[in-house]
Image (cartoon, helix red, strand yellow):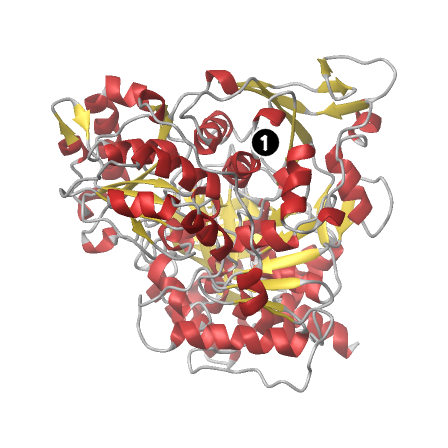
Amino acid sequence: MVELINHGVYLLNGTEVCDKYEGMTPDEARENTITYGILRSHDVDGSKGKKMRIRFDAMMSHDITYVGIIQTARASGLQEFPLPYAMTNCHNSLCAVGGTINEDDHVFGLSAAKKYGGIYVPANQAVIHQYAREMMVKCGNMILGSDSHTRYGSLGNMGVGEGGGELVKQLLKNTWDINAPEVVLVWLEGKPKKGVGPHDVAISLVKATFESGAVKNKVLEFAGPGVKELPIDFRNGIDIMTTETTCLSSIWVTDEEVKHHYDIHERPQDFKELKPGDVAYYDMMIRIDLSSQEAMIALPFHPSNAVTIHELQADPVGILTRIEEDAKKRFGDKVDVHLVDKIVDGKVYADQGIIAGCSGGTYDNLAEAGAILKGKSIGNDYFTASAYPQSTPVSMAVTREGITADLIEAGVVMKPAFCGPCFGAGDVPSNNGLSIRHTTRNFPNREGSKPGQGQLSLVALMDARSIAATAANGGVITAATDVEYENTHKPYVYDEKIYKCRVYNGYGRPRPETELRYGPNIKDWPTMYPMQENMLLELAAVIHDPVTTTDELIPSGETSSYRSNPLKLSEFALSRRVPEYVGLSKEIQKQDLARRAGEVSANIAEALAKVGAKAEETSFGSCVFANRPGYGSAREQAASCQKVLGGDANICYEYATKRYRSNCINWGIVPFTISKETPFEYVAGDFVYVPGIREAILSGKEEIDAKVISAEGVKDIHLYFQNLTADEREILADGCLMNFYAAQKSK
């Protein structure tokens, strides 16, 4: 289904792939990709160098992130939004914690849109990425979003998901700085068989690329004869999942299908044809044969943990036993998982089916599900099913076409536009329940359970078609390719009326006299201190998992209700992975604040004495070690919560994503790495002393000798902090992005 070709290829005239071409070098021909055409046009330097400084055309945020972004930007000198900035409210945590918290954030967002000239999309009107698809994208443009799944390449718009700090930079008319990326040709051939959907293709793509990191920080460029065989919703469904490959962004060739999208959304002027030049070079290639694609299931606890549904049906005991063993490794004795109990008479039963969010709740997906379930019933046993149309225009379309009636009559519960089941804030299954979902992620905690309290439910990803087939079969996991159905629903008809009624669009018309509306849970950032000459770090968490997700660094779900209160939210940092982290970090921070007041604790004094350092010249902060941290969400809280608790550094072998590393830098957390040959055998409570770190960073150095102080004595360790821009070095030295901008204003 998916073949990786791990060497460079040339694409001639958009139709012929070859390994060699004599007339043009790879560097020259790479400039002829769609990717480089867009990136170069947004590079403020206007050069063809190896560094790019990008300004975006528009931005997107949701209600987990926009309060923090605006608060940071205000503290940094924001006057008005210089580009279209849409704030959606699709991550409202509903009744997760009660009180006024969620709606306080929403009225703050509307007041900010009025004050600074933004776009405000009320709760349940649209999930963030669907609103972008409907109202914000333009062929050849770039959109920056504070959500990792900011992907609109299938509509000719390059989307990038980053942490809030990078959006703040854009609001202050600065740039997103990257190394010129490699580009991967994703060559589509054939046509999907009936019953195969976009999630099947996407899961296969993630399975083929994630573990190896083959496309990490690269741009995926989709082309080939198979593109024309895919409707827009199908393309969108694949595209949104490219985030899970760890790629930087994505872009597709555009055609009549894309033109039709812009036409029905009454924006024909925003379409233009995008295609590679006559000779384009790609650093590697992925060939996908759509005609051989099978119905897939991504098993807990990652989208890449995938098999075909037929493979699961052939060996249910072996495959589910493997997941049980994985759960035991992850959670130990905290939970008791019995997935094999889901097998009855050789068939695997799910407890819940969900079709939701930016990937699942499309018109086409719901239409296909409605066709499969028409005249059938999900039954009255334990299995339940819900569907979340991804916007009110989609909801109106499925209602007018009778799709909603077909789903409801079958027993499916229809919900509003909400990202809840994708991030653990809605439709939480029962303990030991198995939920099959057409959503983007199935990490632990994304289902909303609490393993630390002995609760664990599990999520597997499937396409909406196979979820509907499963629902029609009473919860028995079933591939949609194995059922007979006929989709006779009419094509999608877009109606913008609801947006005209409810969405506030103040772009270009700021009202500076508007007072921001604060609730009691919206708090300013605490004081962040500039970097001192030396750094003493105490390890507050040491994690040797292959990958550490941002959901482990700061859990999603109900904790997101505290998103606008840095102190309260930080209480949840690493709470579901290293519960003792918060308490230890607070104690470290308390000792540093005392040191700054001239009272040096015995703990600090003893450590510094072993390396001959002075307390007045040496900061004391917490540090997290993880093998490969930062895979997953773009939420900067994964870094900011560490900073709020006094975190000064991360140490790892590599960062899983650029966005997490950028978040660390923007919050003044030094992103140290160590060589892959260096064993890290230290534990929480050990110290790392880094002499002369401030001078090293400001002078442009990229590595430094440090010392580890443990019960076994003092040992040398070599740390790297490579590939920092000049601004990033200043940000680290100043202590965080806000301090950096404050320093700039005072000069």
Q: Is residue 83 left or right of residue 573?
A: right
On the rendered structure, is 354 left or right of 452? Answer: right
- Residue 417 drawn at (x, y percent): 43, 56
In the picture, which quadrant includes the C terminus? bottom right
- What residue does disc 1 label? 215
Q: Secondary structure at mark 1?
A: loop
**408 left or right of 681 in image:** left
Nearer to us in this view, 747 or 597? 747
Of the pair 189 and 643, the residue shown nearer to us? 189
Q: How many marks?
A: 1
Relative to 390, is 284 above or below? above
The picture places residue 141, in percent across and down from the top left corner, at 73, 48
Q: Residue at x 51, y 54 (%)?
A: 393
- The answer to whether one can see residue 525 in this image is no
Q: Count residues near mark 1 (Cα–Cα under 10 Å), then give few for <14, some for 14-19, many for 20+.
A: many
Q: Position of residue 342 (x, y in %)?
A: 16, 33
Q: Is residue 632 above or below residue 623?
A: above
The answer to which of 225 and 590 lies nearer the viewer is 225
- The image position of residue 473, as x and y in percent, is 22, 31
User: Residue drawn 73% across and 12% down?
Assistant: 18
Residue occupying the point 50% across, 77% down: 107
* Amino acid on which disc 1 is placed: Val
